[in-house]
Amino acid sequence: MIVPISNSIFGIRIFYRGVMRIIVADTKEEVALIAATLMSEQILRKMNSVIGLATGKTMEPVYEHFKKLVDSQKLDLNQLHFFMLDEYIGLDLKHSSSFQSYIKQRVLKPLNLSEAQFSFPPANLPEDSAGDAYEKEIEQFHGVDFQLLGVGRNGHIGFNEPGSERKSLTRVVRLTEDTREANQSDFSDRSVPDLALSMGIETIFRAKELVLIATGVSKADAIHHLMNSNESSECPVTFLKSHERFTLVLDREAASRLS
């Protein structure tokens, strides 16, 4: 059995704000281990879970720890299905900086999973039909059981930038300069695409459980707004605070503006 997080990592603090569960750890590495453990616990509860995956540097150690947990506990992943949160538009899906390549490199191949177990945002479809196609595919799997999330410096979730509405579904979005700048290091020629296909806020909110992780001082403002501001399209992450099963996992730096 997976050891519960409260017993496996010393020094973490767990508290609640409304329906939110907030876990504060000392280091980024501990945050990653907690997130991986929560995902493993979900699989133990339901072997055929539908799991939503996020990308980015924050998630890299999460998937490394998850691989170790899978190996040490001999978890059976054959009944799982995975949905990706978003994908760039106008980028070859085989490009090394595509999110599809990211997931294949860090999740699919290390865990010896089948590509049939993954649903990738159809960023190669016409823009007016891609979002609907992805929504229908999620419905076919009866929704997402466990959604892993990060947060942008400006409070975006997925690629739901400031200005995104609470009821938004999967759609084409235009990336802000702040987001493109934050992602430039992933592109050797610094040419980050302008557009992406992203699950909407409503799509994310429909998941049965949300786990959002944030590390580093650059995320402290977004976390401060999440905890202290009303729900607002100007900071999309604030919409998640009313989800009935929402866990926020932070390191000390990301939690530095919390009282």
Image: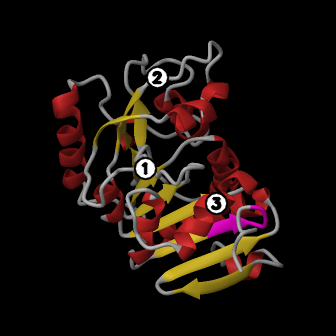
- The residue that appears at 82% across and 78% down in the rendered structure is 10
**Residue 216 in view here:** no
Which amino acid type is shown beneath numbered disc 2? Pro
Magenta stretch: residue 250 in it?
A: yes
Residue bearing the label numbered 1? 162
Lower sequence index among marks 2 and 1: 1
Q: Which residue is mark 2?
A: 193
**Residue in the image at 71% along x and 62% along y:** 254
- Kindly indicate whether the residue at mark 1 contacts the one at mark 2 (C-beta within 8 angstroms): no
Front label number (3 vs 2): 3
Hey, what amino acid is under mark 3? Asp
Nearer to the camera, 244 or 189: 189
Report x, y in % for residue 96: 56, 20
How far is the residue under mark 3 from the one under mark 2?
25 Å
Q: Few, some or many C-alpha atoms within 10 Å of disc 3 (few <14, some 14-19, many ≥20)?
A: some
The residue stretch that appears in magenta:
249-253
Task: Check disc 3 and report the residue beneath it.
Answer: 221
Is 186 placed left or right of 121 in the picture? right
Q: Amino acid at mark 1?
A: Pro
Please report whichever mark, 3 or 2, sits nearer to the chain's N-terminal start: 2
In this rendering, which labeled residue sits more in front, label 2 or label 1?
1
Which structural element holds mark 2? loop
Dominant secondary structure of the magenta stretch? strand
